Structures are given as structure tokens and as C-alpha cells.
Image (cartoon, rainbow, N blue to C red):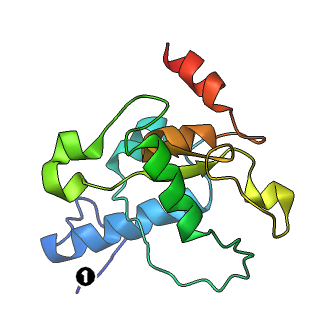
Amino acid sequence: MQQWFPQQSGISIKEEVLESLESNWFNFIKENKYIKNSFVSNDVTTQFKKTYKEGKSKDILQTRYERNPEARKRCLKHFGYSCKVCSYDFEKHFGEIGKGFIHVHHINQISEIGKEYEVDPIKDLIPVCPNCHAMIHSKRPAFTIEEIKEIIR
């Protein structure tokens, strides 16, 4: 599509070749790490056409600790469906589709216990919204309910 004669001056690049050529050139620069030296100024990175890939499958082996649905029901019957950290209530916010939605957090992580055990739905479980639940588990060992409440305050 394009013929090159380096001895010529004033070579113009055909429009239909330009995008592909720039893409290949910038990929070459990135792969060879020329960006961080004087060969190319750092502002060239803003010109990169970035692509992101997702969806590649990966086989994993995982240990999953089963939860008891009856213990969850008993916990929610006792505490209700609002977050015991931030008081968020999905039904109040979303109406009918939020009714009955809440995470139930194990105060002592099942993975740390590492075996089957008897759970007390009132002492060992507590309803929390997904955001608070994620923050509780954002470090190891997990934050306590009291620590997360204090962070929010």
C-alpha cells in the first residue's frame, strides 16, 4: 500500500496506512522501553491508542466454606435488614427490588477457623451492606465492626 524510498525528501504517508503505522511504531516504542529515555519525549504516551482486554478464562482451585442459610435467616430475623455499620437500608433506597437484600458478615472469618463449626447466628453473624463488608475485609486480619464504625465517624 505504501512504497518507501528513503533517499527521497518530502515523503508523504497515505491516510489508509497512517493509523496502522503509528500504532505499530508506538507499540515498538513501548515494548522496547524507549519512552523513559531521550529517544522519545514522555508526552508521546498521551498519543498511545490504549486497548484493554478482558474475559480470558483461567482455571483455579479454590476452597469454599459453606454457609448455613438457616443461620443467615435467624441472624436477619434478629437484626433486621439494615447495615449494622452505616444503617443503610436497601428497601428504603430501592423500594421493592431492595427488599431483603443485605450481606451477612461472619465476625470470625470462616477461612481462619478452617473447619466445620457451630455458628451462633446472633453472636457470630451481623448484617452489613456490601460497601461496609468490602471495607471490613480490605485488610487481613479483617477490621472489626467497631473499627469500621470509628472510621466512618
Q: Is residue 7 visible?
A: no
For label 1, count other residues whose C-alpha is less than 10 Å away and answer few (under 14), some (14-19) or many (20+).
few
Question: What secondary structure is found at the residue carrying circle 1?
Answer: loop
Q: In x, y percent, where is residue 41?
A: 48, 37
Query: Is residue 67 or residue 118 the one in the foreground?
Result: 118
Q: Is residue 53 visible?
A: yes
Question: Left of 139 or right of it: where is 96?
Answer: left
Q: In x, y percent, where is residue 128?
A: 48, 42
Based on the displayed image, in which of its 4 quarters is residue 86 positioned?
A: top left
Q: In x, y percent, where is residue 125?
A: 61, 48
**Above or below 76: residue 38:** above
> What residue is drawn where x is 52% and y is 65%?
28
Based on the displayed image, in which of its 4 quarters is residue 139 positioned?
A: top right
**Above or below 82: residue 120:** below
> What residue is drawn where x is 23% and y is 46%?
91
**Above or below 20: residue 11:** above
Query: Is residue 18 or residue 51 the one in the foreground?
Result: 51
Q: In x, y percent, where is residue 145?
A: 62, 31
Query: Is residue 51 or residue 10 the one in the foreground?
Result: 51
> What residue is drawn where x is 19% and y is 40%?
93
Based on the displayed image, in which of its 4 quarters is residue 37 positioned?
A: top right
Q: Where is mark 1, residue-wise?
A: 2
> What residue is drawn where x is 48% and y is 45%?
78
Q: What's under tag 1, amino acid-wise?
A: Gln
Question: Left of 65 or right of it: where is 71?
Answer: left
